[in-house]
Image (spheres, rainbow, N blue to C red):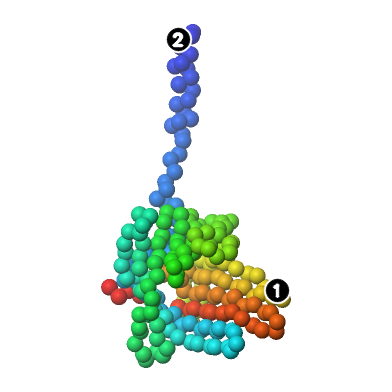
Amino acid sequence: MKQLLPYLLIGALLPISACKKEVDYEAIDMGYEYFPNRVGAYIDYEVDSIHYGITVDTTQFFLREIIAEDFIDQEGNLAVQVERYKKFSMGAEYELTDVWVQLRTSTTGERVEENQRFVRMVFPMDADANWDGNAYNTLDEWTHTYGSIGGSYSLPPLSFTDVVRVNQRNNVNLVDQEEAWEVYARGIGLIHKRFKDIEFQNFEITGVDVEMKAIAYGSIQ
């Protein structure tokens, strides 16, 4: 009987192992297409910017972001250069103003803007996810969450059928007005952004209020 015991145990385990279902990771929608890195893709934005200080300066301009080329960064990740062009009227020619870096790892969508690295997204997308968008820079912690995943969005004359909203900041009181969020469209990228950081102190207002709206997108290749 002792000699048969090992075989009986193996036989009892076989049905359980045979019924175990393999996880198909390729079938999981990680959400990468909301943060695409296709070289040649571009997005045009209309930008309204207000700077509060000794004076109030209001500026409207047009911004074009082009994913220019990819490269391997110092950490060994595939990254892309984002060339940013600006003009102040529709009839003018775009002029290159700066170059940022964007990278998408298996778990994050990140941007290096003016030498500050921001975590714009985390993957896979989950309605309960939260993360520190400033985890890789020296700024104060800002907890980001997904406000919605999926659904349509309208920015006349453009409309989008599949978007995700990232809530970055919502802190409004008698002293501060901090409001920041971004909306991304699948297969396109960032289409709408609001960044408001205003402080009221000693009867003075300081800070910035910026809104970016996509007005065109496509590919130059």
**Location of residue 165 in the rendering, given as x and y in whole percent from the top left corner:** 53, 67
**Residue placed most toward the observer, 150 or 190:** 190
State which tag comes first along the sequence, 1 or 2.
Answer: 2
Give the residue type at disc 2: Gln
**Residue placed most toward the observer, 148 or 60:** 60
Q: In which quarter of the image is residue 92?
A: bottom left
Residue 82 appears in the picture as rendered: yes
- Quadrant where the C terminus is found in the figure: bottom left
Give the residue type at disc 1: Asn
For mark 2, does the 10 Å Cα neighbourhood hold few (<14), some (14 to 19), or many (20 or more) residues?
few
Work out whether 49 lies above or below 125.
below
Tell me the residue that label 1 is attached to: 173
Circle nearer the viewer, 1 or 2: 1
Which residue is found at the position 42% from the left and 51% from the top?
27
**Location of residue 87 in the rendering, given as x and y in whole percent from the top left corner:** 40, 86
In the displayed structure image, the side of residue 98 where residue 143 appears, left or right: right
Which residue is found at the position 46% from the left and 58% from the top?
108
Which residue is found at the position 40% from the left and 62% from the top?
103
Tag 2 secondary structure: loop
Work out whether 167 lies above or below 60.
above
